[in-house]
Amino acid sequence: MSFREPHDLHKRRWSRNLGLGLVLGIFVALVFGLTLVKVSQNPIQLPNTATQEGGN
Amino acid sequence: MTDASIQTRTDSGDAQFGDYVALLKPRVMSLVVFTAAVGLLAAPGSVHPFIAFFAVLCIAIGGGASGALNMWYDADIDLIMKRTQGRPIPSGRVTREEALAVGLTLSGFSVVMLGLASNWVAAGLLAFTIFFYAVIYTMWLKRWTPQNIVIGGAAGAFPPMIGWAAVTGDIALESVLMFGLTFLWTPPHFWALALFMKSDYKDAGVPMLTVTHGRKTTRRHVFAYTFPLAVLAIGLAFTSVGGPIYLTVAVILNALFVKGGWDILRRDEPTSEADGYKVEKRYFAFSLLYLFLHFGAILAEAALRPWGLGGW
């Protein structure tokens, strides 16, 4: 199946796909950025393994 | 898939990406973004700039989602009113089912992401705002009572309160007064619009005050609302978000707003018809500037505070 000239339908579909792709890309970047900020604000507290081992 | 089937689908409305963006009412979103950002920046305390940006984005998307739900439910009257005939659903570019899916998905997404990014008080307020606009206003009040715009105006008034809560995790006098400012501003703003959008609401069967109680009563209501609005707007100057800049702006703007309401009250229909509702249109345009400058003044006070200039 081939179309020599892009039908208007394909232009609109391309616009939709491109827009959705950009939105998803931005969403991933935002969640990544949010994760970095949250982790830097509240550093993960690792359990003090040395004390635990000493106690055992 | 054949060429014929493609043609059929084109006729049924294959939307561009921009049509889905239009579902979110971008112009209303701009007001939501601005007032939410002011509420956030005026709040005591601070948040990381990225979280502040993310919170405002979530509030904007939540506001947009409620706009999509509004368009889904109101597709029948949007088709009748000239002002709304070009919207994506009445023009056939987007189906009602698509609008509902976009509205529900973005509602859930914005509330959950705001809760995760800031706090659940802000997220709860956003969820209530979406529910209020989509269910209380759109599905219930709009087609039932001429007070639709009075009570429904609450939905558009919540964003500064949500922005404030995103920082403090709480509700305070200042955030309630910022809510009240937009809440009391909404009726005269929309009634001025209803005065010059002559037959639109009547044709659509929407019980706007102009349709149920006539234009003279609507003019009286516009004027009457300018007084409690002025008291609240000027009163906000004496809270922690106010200051001399805000007070000056509020006094000038409210004097002009009351004067504008008086001008509308004095006019009759033949005079308005004769000049194409010039005064009503000017008042509607000024009402947009009125709200923008009030929140702009609050923003100015907040921006100057670190240098010891803002506030009292």
Image (tube, coloured by chain):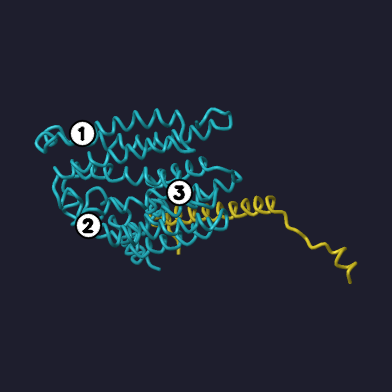
Residue tagged 2: B145
Secondary structure type for disc 1 = helix
Residue tagged 1: B262
Judging from the image, what is the letter of the chain drawn in cyan?
B
Q: Is residue B37 left or right of residue B130?
A: right
Amino acid type, mark 3: Met
Q: Are marks 2 and 3 on the same chain?
A: yes
Secondary structure type for disc 2 = loop
Secondary structure type for disc 3 = helix
Residue A40, horizontal then vertical, whole percent:
69, 50
At a point 45% along the width and 46% down the height, the residue shown is B173
At a point 72% along the width and 54% down the height, the residue shown is A43
At a point 41% along the width and 60% down the height, the residue shown is B103
Residue B112, horizontal then vertical, whole percent:
52, 60
Give the mark nearer the N terminus: 3 vs 1. 3
Q: Colour of chain A?
A: yellow
Displayed quadrant of residue A13: bottom left
Q: Residues within 10 Å of mark 1 (few under 14, many from 20)?
A: some
Numbered badge on residue B155: none
Residue tagged 3: B161
Q: Compute the Cα span from label 3 to label 1.
A: 31 Å
Rendered view: B40 above or below B103: above
Residue B10, horizontal then vertical, whole percent:
34, 60
